[in-house]
Amino acid sequence: MIEVDKTNFEEEVLKAEGLVVVDFWSPKCEPCKELMPHVAKLAEKYQGKAKFCKLDTAANRRLAISQKVLGLPTIAFYKNGEKVAELTQEVTVEDVEAKLNELV
Amino acid sequence: MSELYDIIIVGGGPAGLAAGVYGSRSRLKTVILQKGTPGGQAATTEELENYPGFPRGTKGPELMKAMADHAESFGTEILNEEVVDLDLDGDIKVVRTKSGKEYQSKIVILAPGASPRTLDIKGEQEFRGKGVSYCATCDADFFEDLDVVVVGNGDAAIEEAIYLTKFAETVTIIVIHDEGILDCNKVSAEKAFANPKIKWVWNSVLEEIQGDGLVERVLIKNIKTGEISELETNGVFFFVGTVPNTEFLKGKVKLDDRGYIITNDKMETSVPGVYAAGDARVKYLRQVITAASDGAIAAFAAEKYLAEEETFREQVLKADKPVMVAFWAPQVEESIAAIGELERIADKLGDSVKLVKMDTYRNQRVASRYGIKEIPSLLLFNKGEVAVKIAGSMSEEKILPHLYARIKSK
Ligand SMILES: Cc1cc2nc3c(=O)[nH]c(=O)nc-3n(C[C@H](O)[C@H](O)[C@H](O)COP(=O)(O)OP(=O)(O)OC[C@H]3O[C@@H](n4cnc5c(N)ncnc54)[C@H](O)[C@@H]3O)c2cc1C
């Protein structure tokens, strides 16, 4: 998974072509840390079909809020730079994969 | 199909982890099935200051990590699995998980805990993760220099509100009671009243959450005057109690009408070999210490159960001669006389029969399994099956014919 922050979010997500999945997390969020390894596995499984990024919201609060993310964990799906779907709180990896299948 | 465990614990909050410590320390093969990281609700609070021996400044995630390490150090396995279905009726319990696996054990300890209660206020669902939150530790740092509202006034609400003041510019607590009245403990109330960042709205409830993509304002209703006022805010935190995570247990063990698991003081549920511990059961105080206490009791009772069952199996069901199982109780005079009589009979027959005494005051399980209603009672077992059942006083005339018949038929 690509680590994104305020310096490369635009390049990696908003200007990217195709499907980009962004995992919003923070070091204090236990559910986020439990979800992330599962999302990383999806990243391998869907290699070439979707790009997977992670964003530490504690270090990039303004960026997260600009993406209307104000709660964790949040998994946002972007298509050609446009947010097309979002899962937030009580997210399971099954939900993420189902949404992914809908979008690829 | 997996190997057979002695104990499967469902849920790895403080109740499940304490049960793990006690279970594995008694050398029982113990596994905790926990969806996600262990720790439960207690791992979602930074302010955990009332667990004895762990003073001010103790953080929930750290204490829970220590409990998990402690359980593992005695051999408890902790697996990342969500339990979706259970088969609890037989001697061997079967537990199925979302990942499609099956686990088997002799004992199940249910410790699924509780989740935050939602109020179904207009906007609450829509703005989840958009400013509406149930976990201060998870989301507090988003609200640095912003304004938030807290709904609720119990221990969790007031303590989490104080925590939020480390981040937010203002924290407005909406309280349904008259001015100055809170449901939380006095120490936290005093701390909150002295905190300049905390503001109060009394006699009020949250009516609606509004915004465009993110929370922007809330509507607050004064329950005395009926008046509705608007307050600009960036976040709304709900701490209005919890509901038990027992949906998957409906029809499996007895629940009360609010969904809490019913147990006795040994943590036994309505199903033999199945115990419950922690916030998910009917109890008076739901805290880390009482959850841990429940877990200890459940694992201890489970260990006794396993030992008793094992003894019964070895001594009665697998015996190679007829076995008289005598049900007595120290407070029933007649039953003590009956035991004396049976001992005489057993002596007389020497090696060809066996006598096993069951103190029903200490162990009612076997008695109730075999439908024993009267004390004294005698069950004559032959080849693992009940051959004869006799209630009331015991005498040679009543018993010997049955014994002779069995001994001869051997
Ligand atoms: C914000 C907040 C602050 C608190 N502050 C304090 C405090 O300061 N002091 C204090 O003593 N107490 C505090 N409490 C209460 C305390 O956290 C609980 O009483 C305690 O955690 C209950 O423990 P438990 O093990 O019964 O359940 P939980 O802690 O709820 O743990 C249950 C676990 O089981 C898991 N689970 C549920 N269903 C399944 C399933 N089907 N399969 C697998 N796993 C499952 C859950 O994911 C969870 O991890 C607080 C609670 C909250 C919410």
Image (spheres, rainbow, N blue to C red):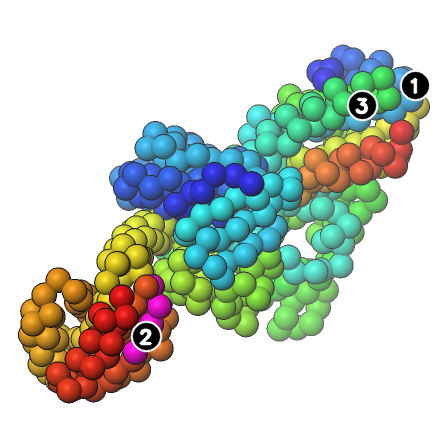
Quarter-wise, where is residue B324 in the image? bottom left
The reply to the same-chain question for discs 3 and 1 is yes
Q: What residue is rendered at 66% in x and 29% in y?
A: A38
Viewer-proximal residue, B6 or B297?
Answer: B6
Left/right of residue B266 with respect to residue B229 in the rendered view: left
Where does the image place residue B239, in percent across and percent down from the top left? 56, 53
Left/right of residue A96 with respect to residue B162 in the rendered view: right
Indicate the chain on which mark 2 is placed: B
Tell me the distance, in whole angstroms, between the alpha carbons under discs 1 and 2.
79 Å
Q: What residue is rendered at 86% in x and 28% in y?
A: A78
Q: Is residue B133 above or below residue A100?
A: below
Q: What residue is rendered at 55% in x and 30% in y?
A: A28
Tell me the distance, in whole angstroms, between the alpha carbons under discs 2 and 3.
65 Å
Asked if one can make out residue A79 in the rendered structure from this viewpoint, the answer is: yes
Q: Main secondary structure of the magenta part?
A: strand
Q: Reply yes or no: does residue B387 show up in magenta.
A: yes
Q: Is mark 3 within 8 Å of ligand 1?
A: no
Which corner quadrant holds the N terminus of chain B? top right
Identify the disc placed on residue A46: 3
Quarter-wise, where is residue B382 in the image? bottom left
- SS type, badge 1: loop
Q: Say few, some or many: other residues with alpha carbon within 10 Å of mark 1 (under 14 / 14 to 19 / 20 or more).
A: some
Where does the image place residue B390, in percent across and percent down from the top left? 25, 83
Q: Which residues are magenta?
A: B384-388
Q: Which residue is mark 2?
A: B387
